[in-house]
Image: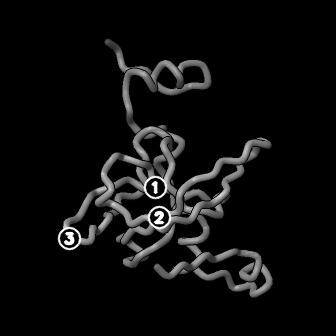
Amino acid sequence: MAQLKPTAVNTKQMESIDKTIHPLFTPYCKPAKIVRNDGSVKQIQTLRDTGAMQSLLKYTHNSNDYITTDETRLLKGITTNTLTVPLVQVHLRTDFIDETVFCGLVSELPDGIDFLIGNNIWLTAHPLPDEVIEQAITYTFSCS
């Protein structure tokens, strides 16, 4: 079968053939690692989303990847729909951070993406110079 190149017309058809990352996302994707409590490491693919306030982890039926917090977060995109997702802790190791972070646990992310890096994580390592803008970002910390 010939390989389809994504266009507005055949992107949906391509998804059923190949679970690779969409070419428009690749400049914003980087490999990373989840460090589990037992010290083992899982390779993941991240996508940086500048419009996301909350980072998200794709649910994979492996509870060793995260620690539950018994808290939830409300997510709202460009539609009027609101989604309630569990908040979990993961130890994320990237080229800019190596620490435990909080993220929402979701059943779906774009094909090939395991972790969406939102502003709640990005801004801890890349603070904004303008204090007024920085104050608009909501950080959530929880002690278990």
Residue located beneath label 1 in the image: 57
Marks 2 and 1, how far apart at CA: 9 Å
> Measured along the vertical axis of the image, is residue 69 above or below residue 139?
above
Q: Earlier in the sequence, mark 3 or mark 2?
A: 3
Q: Nearer the viewer, mark 1 or mark 3?
A: 3
The residue lying at 51 percent from left, 48 percent from top is 106
Marks 1 and 3, how far apart at CA: 19 Å
Residue located beneath label 2 in the image: 88
Dots 2 and 1: beta carbons under 8 Å? yes
Marks 3 and 2, how far apart at CA: 17 Å
Q: Earlier in the sequence, mark 1 or mark 3?
A: 3
Dots 1 and 3: beta carbons under 8 Å? no
**Residue 100: horizontal and vertical position, in percent?**
41, 76
The residue lying at 38 percent from left, 72 percent from top is 95
The residue lying at 69 percent from left, 75 percent from top is 138
Residue located beneath label 3 in the image: 38
Quadrant the N terminus occupies: top left
Q: Which mark is residue 144?
A: none
**Residue 104: horizontal and vertical position, in percent?**
53, 58
> Measured along the vertical axis of the image, is residue 40 above or below residue 112?
below
- Circle 3 SS class: loop
Q: Earlier in the sequence, mark 2 or mark 1?
A: 1
**Neighbour class for label 2 at 10 Å: few (<14), some, many (≥20)?**
many
Q: Is residue 29 left or right of residue 40?
A: right
Of the residues shown, which amino acid type is indicated by label 3?
Asp
Q: Nearer the viewer, residue 116 or 8?
A: 116
- Circle 1 SS class: strand
Dots 3 and 2: beta carbons under 8 Å? no
Of the residues shown, which amino acid type is indicated by label 1?
Leu
Q: Is residue 87 left or right of residue 137?
A: left
- Circle 2 SS class: strand
